[in-house]
Image (spheres, rainbow, N blue to C red):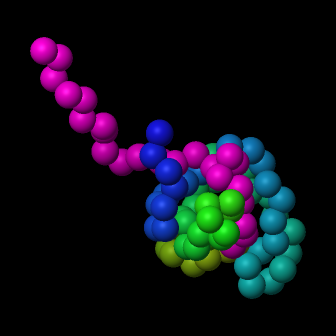
Amino acid sequence: MRKIHLHDTVALTEDTKAQRFLSGGKILLRRGQVGTVVEELGQGEAFEIEFAQADGQAYAMLAIKPEKLMLLYYEPLELAAAS
């Protein structure tokens, strides 16, 4: 399993309470909510994740432990041909 890196696309594995980025209002980020890794905290102990609308406007940013994130893939893993 590949480790999470800066700029990776990830999804939450559980519902998470957060505050709206600009207004401070309370929101619930749902399991499966998609975000982007914008910073590694510690040595991979947590990641700062930005959650944004389809138009790119950020609505939440918060630190999340890697075990509460699922790395998303856009391309399949190429397997070695069987001998």
Q: Position of residue 14 (x, y in %)?
A: 74, 44
Q: Nearer the viewer, residue 75 or 1?
A: 1
- Is 77 situated above or below 80? below
Q: Is residue 2 left or right of residue 66?
A: left
Q: Position of residue 40 (x, y in %)?
A: 59, 69
Residue positioned 30% across, 37% down in the render: 77
Does the rendering let one see residue 42? yes
- Is 29 situated above or below 74? below
Q: Position of residue 30 (x, y in %)?
A: 72, 50
Residue positioned 13% across, 15% down in the render: 83
Q: Is residue 75 left or right of residue 27?
A: left
Within the image, what quadrant is residue 53 found in? bottom right
Q: Nearer the viewer, residue 55 or 12?
A: 12
Residue at the outermost top position:
83
Does the rendering let one see residue 31? no
Number of numbered discs on residues: 0
Q: Which residues are magenta?
A: 61-83
Q: Is residue 19 left or right of residue 30?
A: right
Residue positioned 68% across, 60% down in the render: 45
Residue at the outermost front position:
43
Residue at the outermost right position:
26
Residue at the outermost left position:
83
Residue positioned 48% across, 61% down in the render: 5
Residue 76 is one of the magenta-drawn residues: yes
Q: Position of residue 82 (x, y in %)?
A: 17, 17
Q: Nearer the viewer, residue 83 or 6?
A: 83
Residue 59 is one of the magenta-drawn residues: no
